[in-house]
């Protein structure tokens, strides 16, 4: 099928605004009389609050209010931790610490003053008496008998014991020719959007408007309404332009309650904008996990069984939503695109006195991919195979589809092995290997890393906390001049939904792209929506837009038939017009139909028509009903899976430990591509984040729970100097059952990228006896590993 707009390299329309500094972010919204909030944060990782006296701060000129835990506990309802459908230990907590703090940076009090300067200044006048408690700053320590416990109502510090088993992994491993078992560690790091979190609330008498850079304003509204004890209709939650979210803005934070709470109390607009230090301390951290991976192979390299045992450091666990949710997401994805039958995943997600763990692009799957793909390389070494060949042998090919993975995921489309083949080809993998063999020595060693992954799109087996199913909404309203407005439940933090949803709509309606405008992320304008997470926008939001267009077209056909004075079954809608079947020159174009619908007093009733809008929800559960049931009763968390493969080439200086990336190549399949420019933006941006995760970024704590890297001087983001030239190859197998054929692409780059980079560095150093099992591969870590290998070689120990 040829498309006019879908698949076109359309310039992202948001760019005109955002790149020229014309965007409107929360902090750009200026309402008269706005006052500002600042938050006092705990300097202790774990302590009782014995006394708190806001008096001296309140006495300062310009200070309007100081709120403490007891104010909030008296007047709001607690956040109720929701565990995304898994058996997690429950939690309740208030927006301000009531009598105990559990991590450095936890909100203890909030000051509202005439301006930000006064509010910040006043913080130091709040008198707080803490009684420090022993803190626990690592997952292993949290499991020790007698470790300080964070939540008194729990018997220990384990929030989730996860277990999934299929087949007989132990039996198969016992009989396997080659077994590889390693612990691979991923460090604590997180999303660093350019725009930090921000919130502005204004009490308009009977209603409260909250501007926030949330990834999902409608769910945000539900939670805030619940905490404030308001009906949802009394709240409007809207996100203006958002400068990146990457998962961290999917959570709902204490400030999201404090700001509207203060606005209601004071009757003035209240604004809070997080500073970067606060972002480090109080916005979710992520990724910190160590995973023991055990793989069993036949001598010929056939993968037979996979076992994993994971330990995740959740920080305090007090965050809405998800808590330990990334663990089941990782476990559900671990088979990746590999064929094998016997599988077991065990995991413990443990609370500690650190900032809560939450979503970061990849949502628990990045760590699992890193562990599995590192172990695959170590297995290739043991088997004496090229790491790419080992993967090619085990990846699902088109001939295997439909394929049910060890977790019960039913893969109907996708490229898997073909993606890896395409990435290898584009990277010139075989030539790189030849070059490596030709030039084995020297102080700069060439390393080549390969990795493959899947990306489950639109997680929704359990919906979100059982209260909201995972579906998406879209309404399309034509205006009298023939232009249309699309109201979608998605929310964009930079993903270009305004452009891609317009492309889908223009395509299906057969109209000009410029005739379509897209409205997002406002609970007063869009009936409902689930926003952005789990790379669901294209599939769920795109499919909802297709369905809404079809709904509109059904109405247009009636209208057209009435105008053409023929029976409805004698007309069709094609190329932007209602046409008489068999006589396509007898037609009425979209613009004319709409104009007549608005202007002609008799046409609408004559056509027996309802309002000229198209409306739809798209839910995947309905689509899944046609699929064969899993004979083992496994329930897959995701219905549709994208995939990706990456090749990284690097040079490692063995005297300094410095890694220089030479090239990153990715091939992927996200079904029908709506806009290659948007998809490239997704993948290149994600690969840059992968470089940061693999080489640079680390949130380091000392053993008393103090964060040591709370500035960009200590927490290193990749710059243009660190990111190598990148290439992307698109493979497209349209998703069956999904109107439009779209699958997600938002996270495959951050899932597969870090593994490829880690493997490249490890590959460069393997001949020197260095075994790298953890990230980030900072120069000091690489250098130390080299020294240790040298020492071992020198003492003849290995
Ligand atoms: N797209 C496309 N064709 C496809 C698939 C996607 O053209 N077959 C386009 C989509 O239309 C959309 C973009 O690519 O414009 C991403 O789509 P999708 O993969 O569906 O992901 P979402 O829209 O649901 O976005 C969420 C995803 C997640 S979970 C994180 S985390 C993340 C990511 O997107 N955060 C981001 N990418 C980000 N990109 C930016 N710039 N900022 C973030 O905060
Ligand atoms: S981490 Mo993305 O918001 O699912």
Image (tube, grey):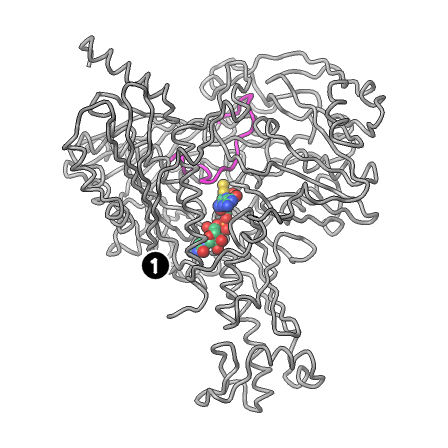
Q: What residue lies at 65% left-to-right and 80% top-to-bottom?
A: 597
**Where in the figure is residue 756, as x and y percent of width and height?**
32, 36
**Magenta-highlighted residues:** 350-368
Residue where numbered disc 1 is placed: 733
**Where in the figure is residue 692, as x and y percent of width and height?**
42, 32
Residue farthest to the top, as pictured: 795
Residue farthest to the front, as pictured: 20
Label the magenta part by its dominant secondary structure. Answer: loop
* Left or right: where 657 falls relative to 440: right
In the image, residue 190 lies in the stretch drawn in magenta = no
Determine the secondary structure under disc 1.
Answer: loop
User: Camera-side residue: 393 or 323?
Assistant: 393
Q: What residue lies at 70% left-to-right and 20% top-to-bottom?
A: 99
- Residue 458 visible in the current orientation: no
Q: Quadrant of residue 660?
A: top left
Establish if 341 lies above or below 552: above
């Amino acid at each position: 099928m040829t498309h006019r707009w879908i698949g076109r390299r359309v310039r992202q329309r948001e760019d005109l605004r955002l790149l020229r500094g014309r965007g409107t972010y929360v902090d750009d919204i200026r309402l008269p009389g706005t006052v500002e909030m600042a938050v006092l944060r705990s300097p202790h990782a774990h302590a009782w609050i014995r006394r708190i006296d806001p008096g001296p701060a309140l006495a300062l000129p310009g200070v309007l209010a100081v709120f403490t835990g007891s104010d909030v506990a008296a007047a709001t309802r607690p956040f109720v931790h929701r565990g995304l459908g898994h058996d997690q230990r429950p939690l309740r907590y208030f927006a301000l610490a009531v009598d105990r703090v559990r991590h450095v940076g936890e909100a203890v009090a909030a000051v509202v003053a005439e301006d930000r300067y006064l509010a910040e200044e006043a913080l130091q006048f709040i008198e707080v008496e803490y009684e420090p408690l022993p803190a626990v700053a690592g997952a292993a320590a949290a499991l020790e008998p007698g470790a300080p416990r964070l939540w008194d109502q729990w018997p220990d510090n384990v929030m989730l014991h996860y277990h999934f088993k299929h087949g007989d992994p132990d039996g198969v491993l016992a009989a396997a020719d080659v077994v590889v078992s390693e612990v691979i560690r991923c460090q604590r790091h997180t999303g660093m959007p350019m725009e930090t979190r921000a919130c502005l609330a204004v009490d308009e008498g009977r209603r409260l408007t909250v501007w926030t850079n949330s990834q999902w304003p409608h769910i945000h509204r539900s939670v805030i309404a619940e905490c404030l004890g308001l009906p949802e209709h009394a709240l409007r939650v809207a996100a203006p332009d958002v400068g990146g979210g990457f998962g961290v803005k999917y959570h709902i934070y204490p400030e999201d309650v404090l700001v509207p709470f203060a606005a209601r109390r004071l009757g003035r607009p209240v604004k809070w904008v997080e500073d970067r230090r606060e972002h480090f301390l109080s916005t979710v951290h992520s990724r910190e996990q160590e995973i023991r991976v055990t793989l069993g192979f036949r001598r010929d390299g056939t993968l037979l069984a996979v076992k994993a045992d994971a330990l995740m450091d959740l920080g305090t666990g007090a965050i809405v939503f998800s808590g330990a949710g990334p663990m089941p997401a990782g476990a559900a994805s671990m088979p990746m695109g590999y064929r094998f039958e016997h599988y077991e995943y065990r995991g413990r997600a443990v609370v500690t006195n650190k900032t809560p763990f939450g979503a970061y692009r990849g949502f628990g799957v990045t760590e699992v991919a890193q562990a599995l793909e590192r172990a695959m390389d170590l297995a290739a070494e043991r088997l004496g195979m090229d790491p790419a060949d080992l993967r090619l042998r085990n990846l699902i090919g088109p001939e295997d589809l439909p394929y049910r993975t060890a977790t019960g995921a039913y893969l109907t489309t996708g490229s898997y092995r073909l993606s890896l083949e395409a990435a290898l080809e584009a990277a010139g993998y075989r030539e790189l290997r030849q070059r490596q063999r030709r030039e084995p020595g020297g102080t700069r060693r060439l390393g080549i890393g390969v990795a493959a992954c899947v990306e489950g799109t639109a997680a929704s087996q359990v919906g979100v906390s059982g209260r909201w199913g995972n579906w998406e909404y879209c309404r399309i309203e034509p205006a009298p001049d023939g232009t249309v407005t699309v109201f979608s439940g998605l929310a964009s933090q930079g993903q270009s939904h305004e452009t891609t949803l317009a492309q889908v709509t223009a395509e299906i309606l057969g109209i000009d792209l410029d005739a379509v405008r897209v409205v997002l992320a406002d609970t007063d304008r869009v009936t409902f929506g689930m926003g952005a997470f789990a790379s669901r926008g294209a599939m769920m939001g795109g499919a909802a837009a297709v369905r809404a267009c079809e709904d509109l077209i059904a109405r247009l056909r009636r209208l057209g038939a009435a105008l053409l004075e023929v029976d409805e079954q004698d007309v069709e809608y094609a190329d932007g017009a209602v046409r008489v079947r068999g006589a396509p020159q007898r037609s009425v174009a979209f613009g004319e139909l709409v104009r007549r619908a608005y202007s002609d007093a008799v046409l609408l009733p004559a056509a027996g028509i309802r309002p000229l809008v198209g409306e739809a929800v798209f839910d995947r559960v309905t689509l899944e009903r046609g699929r064969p049931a899993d004979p083992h009763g496994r329930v897959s968390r995701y219905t549709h899976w994208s995939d990706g493969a990456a090749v990284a080439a690097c040079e490692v200086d063995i005297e300094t430990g410095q890694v220089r990336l030479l090239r990153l190549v990715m091939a992927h399949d996200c079904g029908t591509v709506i806009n290659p420019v948007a998809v490239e933006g997704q993948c290149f941006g994600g690969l840059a984040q992968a470089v940061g995760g693999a080489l640079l970024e680390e949130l380091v704590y000392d053993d008393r729970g103090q964060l040591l890297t709370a500035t960009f001087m200590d927490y290193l983001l990749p710059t243009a100097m660190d990111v190598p030239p990148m290439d992307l190859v698109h493979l497209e197998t349209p998703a069956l059952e999904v109107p439009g054929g779209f699958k997600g692409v938002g996270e495959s780059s951050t899932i597969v990228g870090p593994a490829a980079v880690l493997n490249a560095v490890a590959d460069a150093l393997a001949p020197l006896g260095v075994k790298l099992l953890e990230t980030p591969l900072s120069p000091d870590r690489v250098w130390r590993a080299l020294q240790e290998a040298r020492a071992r070689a020198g003492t003849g120990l290995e």
